[in-house]
Amino acid sequence: MKNTFAILLLVITLFYGCKDENAKRIVPKSSGGSLNDITVVVDNLLWENNIGEVIRDTLAAPVEGLSVDEAQFRLRQMPPSVFTGFATKNRTVLKIEKGKPAGTLFLTNKFAKPQTVVVISGNTNAEIINQVTSNSAKIVDAFRKEELKEKQRRITKSLFNDKDIQKQLGLSLRFPTAYRIAKNEDGFFWLRRDIKTGTVDIMLYEAPLSSIRKGDSTVVDIVRLRDSVGEIHIEGPLEGSYMATEKAFTPFISETILDNKPAFETKGLWDVKNAFMSGPFINYAIEDKVNNRMVIVEGYVFAPSVAKRDYIFELEAIIKSITIK
């Protein structure tokens, strides 16, 4: 009787142990490829017709705020027959499945970790196109969040000690040691990273809550504030010149959340008059009511004749790591 009971107990243990093992399935690590590359798994014929066109229009749309069009994502198409093995380990995947009920699924760590997979299905081309267009904002947002998270993970491998920023501005920013503090003056910080063709820069400072009004005047207030700060702190190569907002280019502005606080995101172009210097900037004005102030964090790029999308993306990843005390 004792032997029978022991055998029964062993069988039960093995059964539930196997269930638990399956529940905690081992997911391989995703491939550490280039940032903002998306694998598009779709039949070659569909890729070449209107389905491929709407996918390209959605995912390879130009980045806002750049003077020259640069696609927000690089797309690598492959037919379903070769989406096996190592190919399934890509960090971001868009999969098109024709001949199934219409729907859009957002899957996390389906084949690897970390990974975002978006599966779009439909019985007809029209249904698939409708799924892409009606969910375009969610699809782009899902892939962007995955890539920003990966960029922030890479940044943490070599972090700059921001103790001076914490002490003076009461905030923390996670940026790599490739940057240096070029200016620390009256609560204004200017961070710089040298690149082959120029620099990638970040400015941090605070302003009164009343300096940026909500409504039609918001973008005017943000431009006026950044121009006044540029005149004081970011001098140009010629006497009397300084960095200002490019007036011929209307900035893109939207509302967002940073560090659980309302913020304005502004993307546009800066220039230095009579010095033939210009480039893109991304500015965040964060409403810090607890400390009765606006926190301004801006990144900008000076890199003539080269693509700037990846630099702006790096700046966005750094800025979105902010924590305000």
Image (tube, rainbow, N blue to C red):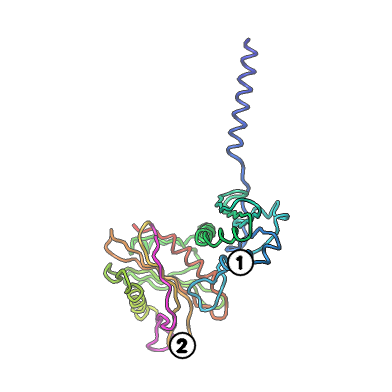
Q: Residue at x 57, y 70 (%)?
A: 71
Mark 1 = which residue?
A: 74
| Amino acid under disc 1 | Arg
Q: Quadrant of residue 215?
A: bottom left
Residue 223: image location, x then y, percent = 36, 77
Q: Which residues are magenta?
A: 235-259
Q: Earlier in the sequence, mark 1 or mark 2?
A: 1
- Examine the structure image and report whether residue 10 is included in the region drawn in magenta: no
Q: Residue 30 in the image: x percent, y percent?
A: 62, 53
318 shown above or below 300: above
**In the rendered structure, which amino acid carries the disc numbered 2?**
Ala
Mark 1: secondary structure: strand
Q: How many numbered discs sit on the rendered protein?
A: 2
Q: Nearer the viewer, residue 10 or 256?
A: 256
Q: Quadrant of the C terminus?
A: bottom left
Mark number, residue 275: 2
